[in-house]
Amino acid sequence: MATVIETIQAPQVQHTECFIGGKWLPAASGKTFATINPATEETIAEVAEGDQADIDLAVDAARKAFDQGPWGRMDARDRGRLMYRLADLIEEEIDELAALESFDNGKPVSVARAADLPLVIDCLRYYAGFADKIHGSTIPVRGNYFTYTRKEPVGVAGQIIPWNFPMLMTAWKWGPALAAGCTIVMKPAEQTPLTCLRMAQLAQDAGIPDGVINVVPGYGPTAGGALVKHPGVDKIAFTGEDRTAKIIMRNAADSLKRLTFELGGKSPNVILADADLDAAAAGAHFGLFFNQGQCCCAGSRVFVDERVHDEFVDKLKDLATNRKLGNPLCQDTEQGPQIDQAQFDKILSYIDKGNAEGARCVVGGKRFGDKGYFIEQTIFDGVTDDMAIAQDEIFGPVMSVLKYKDWDELIDRANQTFYGLAAAVWTSNVGKAHDFARRVRAGTIWVNCYDVFDAAAPFGGFKMSGQGRELGEEGLRAYSETKTVTINLS
Ligand code: ADP
């Protein structure tokens, strides 16, 4: 382990300050915080610790760019052109950005290069194409009036993102906001500020005017809290924990901000006896262990028809045993470390709970190595619905396997969660697949696949998994206001 870690080459860190009004500025307080490499537990860089004063400056810059700057007056097609340019610049730097993402987040560089970055680029291009296709309609009203609607940008968007997909979450937020004509103040997660800061510089290089995108790194309750409460911010888009969303909702109440949330999940992944079991096992493995299990839509409850249960668990065990865990900067690594000490401790405590509650750990179950936040790929069998590992979002490489017998009972059990982000079913019975898609209360249903994302396909949660949708045409709604214009023709 130790020798592998020594091979890591540090990618270049170019930006560690706040990006406000097109300038790189230290935090007004002069404070900084360390961003850590989760594979080595070593500090990568000290980053400006923004708080209220920096948020004030950033909101002023975003307000000015929106109210007076060129952005609001620019032809939509030209806005789109600048977004395409940003996507091109990211593509030109794809290898460096993948390395930086891997270094700051711990995800395997090969995964960042093959999954995160292409999705980032695609998302920006998808929304660039939308910039000049956002329009209202004419409405036939009673009387001699001409009524039409305009779709106008909502204004200054405050955007707060987590650490699990730092660049992708940035693209999901920036894409629709820029296409709609909004300006942005973003607070990246304190664990992973580096790639978002690099993207801000690339946005400036692409020609996106100063003040349109501002990035203030810092902590949630301080920098994030100031952004949520600021009267100059029109809308907050947040991705993170439901616990944090409740705080944000309370803090945004005084200014009645528009809010969209993309929160957690405890997604069911259901294996029918008639499924292609090899494909289903690969899908269940990927659906949970992808990104170290740090996905809001992770398929963490794997329900298996009791008739194929033993055979299926053997397949899961083989796949998990052969998963390559280690240095994320090695090209063949499939699983890196967890993000930080807090997550590492939380995941290990859930593994303890699983054992204590009587689930059977069939693979993994402990720390890997003695340096870095690595946890073995872990599978619990014999899990029942009431166990903590079947109820709580663990956000780590811990799979719970549950048996089922009856279809209707299975649907009830799949729905027995406060969450409703995603669900999947593996079957060769098209009727069962549609029945599942209709009856399971979740924002995304995958049939014979998992974690298939596309910039055009809306994503978001039922119940406590969120409010509103990101991606697709629906993703633009959060950044647009409808204005109705009525003209007296008599
Ligand atoms: P996670 O457990 O994934 O870190 P959080 O919801 O705690 O999820 O964090 C997601 C984002 O929300 C981070 O950028 C974090 O700094 C920010 N955040 C945390 N607390 C607050 C808060 N009180 N107000 C605004 N943003 C916050």
Image (cartoon, rainbow, N blue to C red):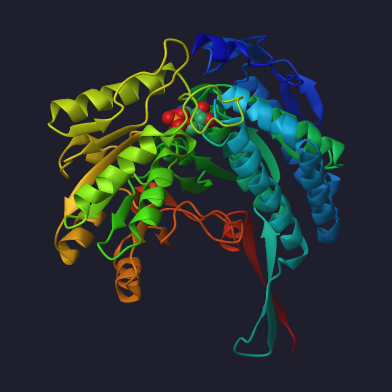
Q: Is residue 123 left or right of residue 273?
A: right
Tell me if residue 155 can be seen: no
- Expressed as whole percent of the image width and height from the top left, the position of residue 348 reads 31, 22
Q: Is residue 189 above or below residue 296?
A: above
Instruction: Report the residue at 17% width, 45% height from top.
Output: 385
Kindly indicate the quadrant of the structure image that contains residue 208: top right
Q: Quadrant of the C terminus?
A: bottom right
Q: Which corner quadrant of the image does residue 333 belong to?
A: top right
Q: Position of residue 269 (x, y in %)?
A: 33, 53
**Of 294 and 401, the residue lying toward us:** 401
Image spot of residue 92 (x, y percent):
81, 39
Give the residue drawn at x 21%, y 51%. 309
Write the residue at 75% across / 56% down.
Answer: 128
Position of residue 390 in the picture relative to residue 89 (left or right)? left
Q: Is residue 91 above or below residue 128?
A: above
Q: Does 452 sit left or right of 351 as displayed?
A: right
Q: Nearer the viewer, residue 383 or 459?
A: 383
Classify residue 343 as left or right of residue 478.
left
- Residue at 69% over, 14% down: 28
Is residue 111 at least partly visible in the picture? yes
348 or 310: which is nearer to us?
Answer: 310
Residue 59 position within the rendered picture, expressed as x and y whole percent measured from the top left: 68, 34
